[in-house]
Image: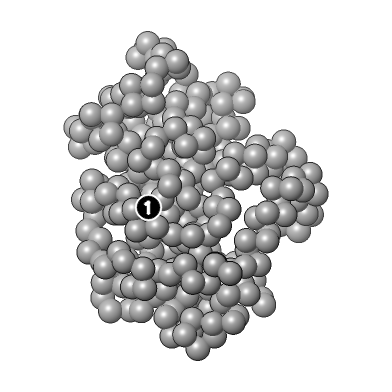
């Protein structure tokens, strides 16, 4: 196999449809709109079974709100009221899940906070440090780095599964086309079971995995930052790779709450299957 990096998750489905790749990863909204248009995708491995973006808020904003770090998670989420929240782009997970979490806390995302498009990791970091935004959510290590440096505090630890509505879901999945899976079942099964073995190996060999990640892919990432990322993300990696209809419907609820339509047949065999991850 060859591993080819693409610039954005938004290009994942295009890579599959063009034949540039046979397997890629994305969230459900990377597949759903095209699936509803008649494109025949098939999700074959549930890679992350919880949402892994942690919500970090500037300390000065928390002080004004009399934030209680010992409150339950939905009460803590109420601190987002009145804040300016950075997102990467509209309808991206940083946008959708921010609005969903506010809704879970009883807030109105349209009136109770201001969501502004900032851009990628570097732009979010700069905007947060300068005070242009009060908070944002992103997967490790940026929220943890900003907390360690004293700029903010993580108020919702989604990497720890604090919100039940965002655990036991399909956050990121590996998918291909139905045609490729039907014509190459042995290759798909070998790949998905190789992912299973890899997840088990990383869990059992953390230090060696960190060295491999650093030497092969993240040479410019500080060791402490890389260690934080791995330690926070490991619990979210599915041990089995299996999907569930209930977990997918949780994701559907997230996007519907944010006003995004997902009208699909959620039964196994439609756009997802567990047959390749089961022996």
Q: Quadrant of the N terminus?
A: bottom right
Q: Nearer the viewer, residue 72 or 147?
A: 72
* Quadrant assignment for the C terminus: bottom right
Q: Is residue 126 visible?
A: no
Residue 59 seen from this side: yes
Rendered position, 219 above or below 113: below
Crowding near the residue tagged with mark 1, few <14, some 14–19, many ≥20 C-alpha atoms within 10 Å: some
- Report the residue at 68% width, 61% height from top: 197
Residue drawn at 72 percent across, 54 percent down: 201
137 w.r.t. 17: above or below: above
Q: Total marks drawn?
A: 1
Dividing the picture into quarters, in which one does residue 229 lie?
A: top right
- Relative to 58, residue 237 above or below: below
Q: Residue furthest front?
A: 279
- In this image, 251 relative to 161: left or right? left
Q: Position of residue 256 (x, y in %)?
A: 23, 51
Q: Residue furthest bottom?
A: 183
Please give left or right for residue 190 compared with residue 18 in the image.
Answer: right
The residue that appears at 33% across and 21% down in the rendered structure is 75
What colouring does the structure picture have? one colour
Write the residue at 61% across / 25% down.
149
Considering depth in this image, is 273 or 206 the residue closer to the camera?
273
Image check: 190 left or right of 214? left
Residue 91: x and y in percent read 31, 52
Residue at the spot of label 1: 247
**Label 1 residue SS:** helix
- Residue 151, percent across and down? 54, 23
The quarter holding residue 147 reads top right
């Amino acid at each position: 196999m060859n591993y080819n990096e693409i610039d954005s998750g938004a290009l994942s489905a295009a890579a599959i449809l063009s034949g540039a790749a046979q397997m890629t990863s994305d969230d459900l909204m990377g597949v759903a709109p095209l699936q509803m248009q008649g494109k025949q995708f098939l999700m074959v491995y549930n890679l992350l079974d919880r949402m892994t973006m942690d919500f970090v808020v500037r300390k000065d904003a928390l002080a004004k709100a009399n934030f209680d770090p010992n409150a339950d998670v939905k009460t803590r989420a109420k601190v987002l009221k009145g804040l300016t929240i950075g997102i990467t782009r509209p309808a991206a997970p940083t946008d959708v899940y921010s609005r969903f979490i506010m809704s879970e806390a009883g807030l109105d995302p349209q009136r109770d906070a201001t969501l502004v498009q900032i851009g990628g990791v570097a732009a979010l970091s700069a905007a947060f440090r300068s005070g242009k935004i009060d908070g944002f959510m992103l997967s490790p290590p940026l929220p943890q780095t900003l907390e360690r440096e004293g700029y903010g505090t993580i108020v919702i630890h989604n990497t720890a599964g604090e919100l039940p509505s965002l655990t036991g879901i399909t956050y990121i999945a590996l998918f291909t086309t139905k045609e490729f899976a039907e014509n190459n079942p042995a290759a798909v099964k070998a790949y998905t079971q190789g992912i299973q073995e890899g997840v088990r190996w990383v869990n059992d060999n953390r230090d060696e995995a960190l060295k491999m990640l650093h030497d092969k892919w993240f040479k410019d990432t500080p060791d402490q930052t890389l260690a934080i990322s791995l330690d926070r993300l490991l619990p979210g990696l599915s041990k089995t790779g299996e999907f569930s209809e209930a977990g997918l419907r949780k994701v559907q609820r997230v996007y519907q709450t944010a006003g995004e339509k997902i009208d699909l047949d959620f039964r196994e065999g439609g756009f997802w299957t567990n047959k390749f991850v089961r022996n």
